[in-house]
Amino acid sequence: HGRICMLGCLGFLTQEKIHFPMAGFDEPLATEAFFSVPAAGLWQIFFTLGFIEVTTNSAGLTPGTMFTSGRAPGDIGFDPLNLSMDDSALRRFELAELKHGRLAMIGLGGMLHQMLQTKVPTLAQLANFKSLEVPSF
């Protein structure tokens, strides 16, 4: 979940400023942009991610059967920089990824709720930030 939220935070902020030059890609608000994607595109994403999930887990679909091969959760064998060569560095990077993932989960939740409440993209709201007035009693 942490890796997904890290990518989600990056996507929310990037999508606000960078767009494909075609109709339907110009919505800066991520919560509204989701609904401009055609249903066939959403099904394509759903089935592609499902295929990846099934193939990387050796067709194990439950937590009890996913890791019977001895693979650790989150370890899909992707290490192009050979960070796993030094065990102490690997543990440090794993801890950093865990902390960043947790922070990204909180951040994505905040950005999502902020967009749903205010209907203003995150960077635009930060650029025009105004504090709330405290009512006097």
Image: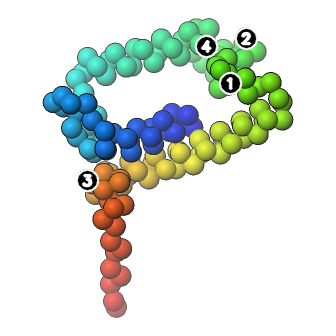
Coloring basis for residues: rainbow
Sequence-wise, the earlier of marks 2 and 3 is 2
Q: Tell me the SS state at disc 3.
A: loop
Q: Position of residue 2 (x, y in %)?
A: 57, 37
Q: Measured along the vertical axis of the image, is residue 10 above or below residue 22?
A: below
Question: Which mark is in front, 1 or 4?
Answer: 1
Q: Position of residue 17 (x, y in %)?
A: 31, 44
Q: Is residue 127 visible?
A: yes
Q: Measured along the vertical axis of the image, is residue 87 above or below residue 102?
A: above
Question: Which mark is in front, 2 or 1?
Answer: 1
Measured in 3D between alpha carbons, the distance from the residue under mark 3 to the one under mark 4, in whole angstroms, is: 39 Å
- The residue under label 1 is 81
Sort mark 2 into few (<14), some (14-19) or many (20+) by Cα contacts within 10 Å: few
Sort mark 4 into few (<14), some (14-19) or many (20+) by Cα contacts within 10 Å: many
Q: Measured along the vertical axis of the image, is residue 7 above or below residue 80?
A: below
Sequence-wise, the earlier of marks 3 and 1 is 1
Measured in 3D between alpha carbons, the distance from the residue under mark 3 to the one under mark 1, in whole angstroms, is: 41 Å
- Label drawn at residue 119: 3
Say what amino acid the circle numbered 2 marks.
Ser
- Label drawn at residue 69: 2
